[in-house]
Amino acid sequence: MLRTVLALFLFTTSSTVTIAQNYDESKVPSYVLPEVLKTVSGKEVRDRKTWEATRRPEILRLFEDHIYGRMPAAFDSISHSITNENRKAMGGNATLKEVAILVYKNSKSVRINLVLFIPNKRKGKSPVFVLINNRGQENTDATRQTKSEFWPAEMVIDSGYAIAAFHVSDLAPDKKETYMNGVLRMYPELLEADNGMKAIGAWAWGASRVLDYFEKDAQIDAKKVIVVGHSRGGKASLWAAAQDQRFAACVTNCSGNTGAALARRQFGERIARINDTFPHWFNNNYKKFNNNENELPVDQHMLISLIAPRPIYATNASKDLWADPTGTYLAMKHAEKVYALYGKKSKLPATPPGINQPFPKAPMAYHNREGEHNMKVYDWTNFIRFAKSFNF
Ligand code: GCU
């Protein structure tokens, strides 16, 4: 409700946006999605080889150039230091590591502050859930004085998984005036280019640098990293998993427009609105698609396809129509054919399941939780079931 009121408020105060939100399924326009399994030159993609050699790189480039922006090609060095370690955290159940990850380029640097809890009872390396935290730092409190459903670390540790988090502001402040004061200071050429990354690209890049660290931590299984994000963080978790294939699986919670929901349905939030309110999230080229969804050479089912054959979990919340639950489900369904190229059969039903009817199984998982736009214990309980479904 709050979001609806906010949306109406923004609508009435915005100067450039001219179209109201649609929340009426009968008013969804008819649309034709770009074909995921046909190359730009018109060739049908029938096998995994052609997908990987031709179509997948093509789609990735289209998302870079038109939406999320080109990513940094390289950096000069990366190092880390453990700033705090406690082997008896959470009453002895976990080892806490606070890690400073430093990345350098052209004598500029960023510092990513990682909080990591590893279950003490697990033998061998742990699989890990890593959250791209777009909310307050208190949600991922290393001291555990503050506990939050948004990152229920104790529950995840009790289930035998490591859990980690870093904050988006370490990479790019989430403000249109200051987003460039992070990773983008190291890559001025990307800041200037119309197809260069902005904040969401920077957050996804940060997730990859955290993965670089996991590859060096003997207690973490870097081949079993599940990247998690909520809402704007869920847009970033999708983009991170799409372009960095080292992520073993992806959770995108209530990610909505320019996340897991189809743009062409024009339901709830639209491209014009997101670009108007958050001009610092996506590249300059994306602004061409304001009120012009059908001209996009991609739609969001193709972003999900880039994650195939790795497990993906998309969620919604029943009162969060802004994020278009039906459009999210359809995007997942339209990506199934790419999973099928790998012999991975999606278990998702033909039509969206009811509220609180989770399908938390690999390769494609989905639920629509009752309630508001948020990430809660209900969601995490199912993310754990999801991880167990592929034996992590
Ligand atoms: C706004 C925005 C959404 C975003 C959400 C969030 O509502 O319009 O696109 O997902 O914030 O990040 O919580």
Image (tube, grey):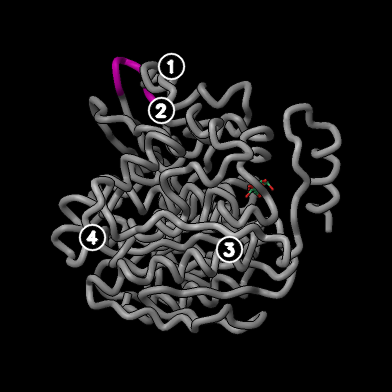
Marks 2 and 3, how far apart at CA: 26 Å
Q: Report the amino acid beneath label 4.
A: Glu
What residue did someone put label 4 on? 44
Judge by depth and name the residue closer to the eye, 161 or 207. 207
Earlier residue among tags 2 and 3: 2
Q: Is residue 108 magenta?
A: yes
Q: Which residues are magenta?
A: 105-109
Q: Report the amino acid beneath label 2.
A: Asn
In the rendered image, the vertical position of residue 362 relative to residue 216, given as above or below: below
Q: Please name the residue shown 39% across and 46% down the image.
A: 207
What residue did someone put label 3 on? 327
Marks 4 and 1, how far apart at CA: 36 Å
2 vs 4, front mark: 4
Q: Is residue 297 magenta?
A: no
Which class describes the residues within 10 Å of circle 1: few (<14), some (14-19), or many (20+)?
few
Q: Report the amino acid beneath label 1.
A: Glu
4 vs 1, front mark: 4
* The C terminus lies in quadrant: bottom left
